[in-house]
Image (tube, grey):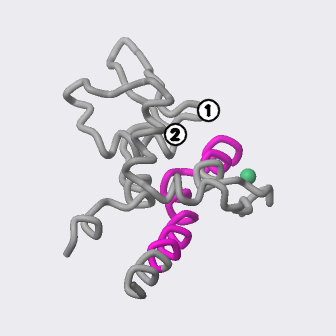
């Protein structure tokens, strides 16, 4: 198995993300008298899933998080101009990331519901990539 096949997929990272969910930002900090908690949207959750934030090395810089996600999940960049109709409101979203944001922010989808929507898209993309590779 190549390293690429071992890599965690986007929908898996979204599904596995822990902690409470938030909207409109990748990450947010919730401070109560009991604890400090990191909240994340579906994509921010994927980011946290890839990082050990118990060490305190989490960036709250939205652009840095975006770059990091695009690096780890090349589908975000490769398909950034692809149109995906949102299954809830029917709006055409440009790129997978916009679709995830619509589901998370506008429709209150849980991470696992978001993961269910992006999984077939991601699997089709991988099949397409693998097909291209074997033709060479
Ligand atoms: Zn929508």
Q: Give the range drawn in magenta.
A: 101-127
**Left or right of 30 in this view: 91:** right
Helix, strand or loop under label 1: loop
Report the Cα–Cα distance between label 1 and label 2. Answer: 7 Å
Q: How crowded is mark 2: few (under 14 residues within 10 Å), some or many (20 or more)?
A: many
Q: Which of 61 and 48 is in front in this view?
A: 61
Mostly what secondary structure, the magenta segment?
A: helix
Residue 21 vertical placement versus 13 (above, below): above
In x, y percent, where is residue 51?
Answer: 28, 39
Nearest to N terminus: mark 1 or mark 2: 1
Quarter holding the N terminus? Answer: bottom left
Residue 113 lies within the magenta run: yes
**Left or right of 118 in this view: 99:** right
In x, y percent, where is residue 132?
Answer: 45, 80
State which quadrant residue 25 falls in: top right
Query: Label 1, on which residue?
Result: 24
Query: Label 2, on which residue?
Result: 41
Identify which residue is drawn at 43% across, 52% down: 14
Residue 89 lies within the magenta run: no
């Amino acid at each position: 198995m190549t390293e690429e096949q071992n890599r965690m997929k986007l929908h898996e990272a979204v599904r596995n993300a822990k902690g409470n969910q938030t909207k409109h930002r990748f990450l947010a900090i919730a401070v109560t008298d009991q604890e400090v908690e990191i909240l994340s949207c579906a994509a921010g959750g994927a980011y946290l899933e890839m990082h050990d934030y118990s060490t305190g090395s989490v960036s709250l810089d939205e652009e840095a998080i975006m770059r990091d996600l695009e690096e780890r999940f090349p589908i975000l960049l490769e398909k950034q101009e692809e149109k995906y109709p949102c299954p809830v409101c029917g709006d055409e979203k440009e790129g997978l990331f916009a679709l995830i944001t619509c589901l998370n922010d506008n429709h209150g989808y849980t991470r696992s519901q978001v993961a269910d929507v992006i999984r077939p898209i991601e699997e089709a993309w991988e099949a397409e990539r693998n097909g291209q590779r074997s033709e060479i």
